[in-house]
Image (cartoon, rainbow, N blue to C red):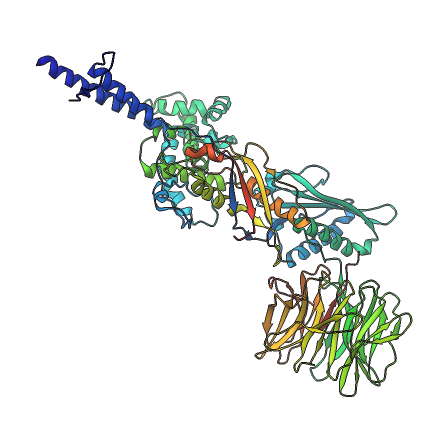
Amino acid sequence: MKVKVNKTLAASIVLHVLVFGWALISFPTRALPVLEEETVAVDVISADQLSHVMAGTKTGDKKNPKPVVEKVADAKPVDDAVGKITEKAPVVTDTSPPPQPKPVEKPVEKKPDPPKPVAEAKPKEEPKPVEKKPETTDPIAEALKKEEKKPPPKPQVEAAKPPPQPPKPKERTFDQTKIAALLDKRDPSRQAVTGDTINSNAALGTSKGSAADNSATWGAMFQRQVERCWKKPFGGIESQNQEAAFTIRLKRDGTLEAAPIPEGTPATPYLRVYSESALRAIIECQPYNLPAAYFDEWKFFTPVFTERKS
Amino acid sequence: MTDKDPSLQIPFRLSRRQLVSGMASLGAIAGIPVRLAYAQKRIPIPEGDFVPLPIAIPNFVAGTPSDGEVGAGVTQVITNNLKRSGLFAPIDQAAYLEKVVNIDVVPQFNNWKSINAQALVTGRMTRQADGRLKAEFRLWDIATGQPLAGQQYFTQPENWRRIAHIISDQIYERLTGEKAYFDSRVVFVDETGAKERRVKRLALMDQDGANVRYLTRGSDLVLTPRFSPSTQEITYMEFGQGDPRVNLLNIETGQREIVGNFPGMTFSPRFSPDGQRVIMSLQQGGNSNLFVMDLRSKSTTRLTDTPAIDTSPSYAPDGARICFESDRGGKPQIYVMPATGGQAQRISFGEGTYSTPVWSPRGDYIAFTKQGGGQFSIGIIKPDGSGERILTSGFHNEGPTFAPNGRVLMFFRDPGGSGGPSLFTVDISGRFEQRVATPGFASDPAWSPLLS
């Protein structure tokens, strides 16, 4: 009897361990779950696809009244970042900030000594007011404080760029608001003046796609994103049946791996201009925010820019 | 308690535990996502909006210190041309991030990308030692970093406006795929004075309104000036001492002659595409018919012989057919007929009366004035009568004329009241309607072919 109980108990324990172990192992390999789309997207997709649809957030759509969200979003992660880098904040603004925090730390070390030892001296001096250079450090400390306050709008944006790395491992929880904040924070850097592409997040995607072919979802996302940039040439009232197709390869972060390859050569000057406008649109709108779950589908495909209404 | 199927006749012994863990592993294996190989997908992108192409045109660099003014002038003319076409959106120079000083180096595309320019025009004007002016320009595609066009021109310094128009044409053609029209002129009837005693003079100007000069003195009433497609000649109607006459005027030499000597009034003259003949309507008695006169041999041919009023003829660009206005069916309508005469076919069937038809230089449309429902409209229709489309409508709109590329129409509009008529342009899609500035009131425009 005892043995029997032990056996069932053992079997039960083993089963439980296996199930939990499997869950532990397999869940993190899946991408983060669904976010709600903010704009009114009109897409013809089936109802159950709708329930599985992930939506990337808007990536810097200028027409979108984003500022409100941005400010809220900025507040959260910047708090973390500023808390981390306060002492180096004035130094950060001096250097042109690369998106990674590591190179930022290097110039910190190279920077002239006064800010750093003062920064270090600051906390040291607080407990020990009696020091050899209180007069000199005080104004410097005040200057430091002033500098910290002065460029907080700047390091907020610039600190917004480095922290994709540090806060990301922190926020690997299922807290959707924080994820939204993380994503939204990309927008100010996107709208920033430089044309550098930033590290995009691993795109959000659903873990389950019940459709056999998910091109309706990521295709619609790609179409929306590239249409924002597409400045179609004016064909007047005769431009029917124009079509320009390209073969493109995308990397995981949504940027182009190589220049898009046009299909065929344009037959007329107008078709050439049409094709060039589509090419510009593809180049300008990268990086594309597409679901990582379907990367194998969208890493190599053919967008077809067309006037044919059929 | 998972009891296994007792009928399971297996040769090896499977303990409960082994079975259970085996099933669990199977479950774990089943949970591993399956990677399929996908074929390359075609994604249609059907919705793009036409947006005027954002283009950056910094001031042309001065090759020598004294060329700054002509550089700025050329840039201004180019920017105006492109903007008025409606297809481009030149970016304000105040927004530029860098000043172009050397056009021979590859630009810093990031600086232009960040102000959202899609194309960049750089240029330089240099006064040469022999007194000529050298103009160079380059057109860059910002997204791909490729040069799209580049040219250099030599000309007399006073022709700087024409160079600017020629450069605008190059930019327009490369970026829209259409033939351009900036290097052309417009002849029109300039009207000044009180409404009851208007002084009407023939005037000639660049298509952007610059360089206005008067061709007649205004002592006689002038109407319907028309350009020759191949020579520097204008034909027009003049109300002199006797009957109104069709005249021919050479712009360069100023030489004038009367076209033919007909009994009766001659109206609405137009050149044939080869510039060798003038077609016009001749009024005899109560009706008017179409006649063609060869300018060299002075021989005339009658084209129509009906008791109706046939007037306002216009040649197709291949010279094989003509369109004209006739009221043989009751009200004025548009008819198409072979250029040598023959059976005329009516093509306009809408509500109202149709007049002043003019065939597009591209041959694909005929523009007309339509009157109906208390409104005057300008519209276009295909030569077979299909695809009628009204471009603008109002109290008064009349007298369309096509730009050399067949895309833009100019017409005149009289707002009524104490004012006077003005010239307007509109694209054949009905968009980009805008006024053309003239020194006084203006009517009856006619667009020249491209000068270059």
Give the number of callouts.
0
Q: Residue at the right extreme? A: B297
Q: Position of residue B444 (x, y in %)?
A: 72, 73
Q: Position of residue A231 (x, y in %)?
A: 57, 49
- Residue A157 visible in this rendered orientation of the protein: yes
Q: Please say if A290 is above or below B186.
A: above
Query: Residue at point 81% right, 79% down?
Result: B238
Q: Please say if B276 is above or below A126.
A: below
- Residue B396 visible in this rendered orientation of the protein: no
Q: Is residue A303 left or right of residue B243?
A: left
Q: Is residue B296 left or right of residue B185?
A: right
Q: Residue at the left extreme? A: A1
Q: Position of residue A276 (x, y in %)?
A: 62, 44
Toward the viewer: B120 or A176?
A: A176
Which picture quadrant has residue A218? top left
Query: Residue at point 80% right, 73% down?
Result: B279
Query: Residue at point 66% right, 83% down?
Result: B330
Q: Is residue A121 left or right of residue B294?
A: left
Toward the viewer: A106 or A94?
A: A106
Q: In which quadrant of the rendered image does the C terminus of chain B lie?
A: bottom right
Which picture quadrant has residue B11? top left
Q: In which quadrant of the rendered image does the N terminus of chain B lie?
A: top left
Q: Position of residue B325 (x, y in %)?
A: 71, 76
Which picture quadrant has residue B440? bottom right
Q: Residue at the bottom extreme? A: B285
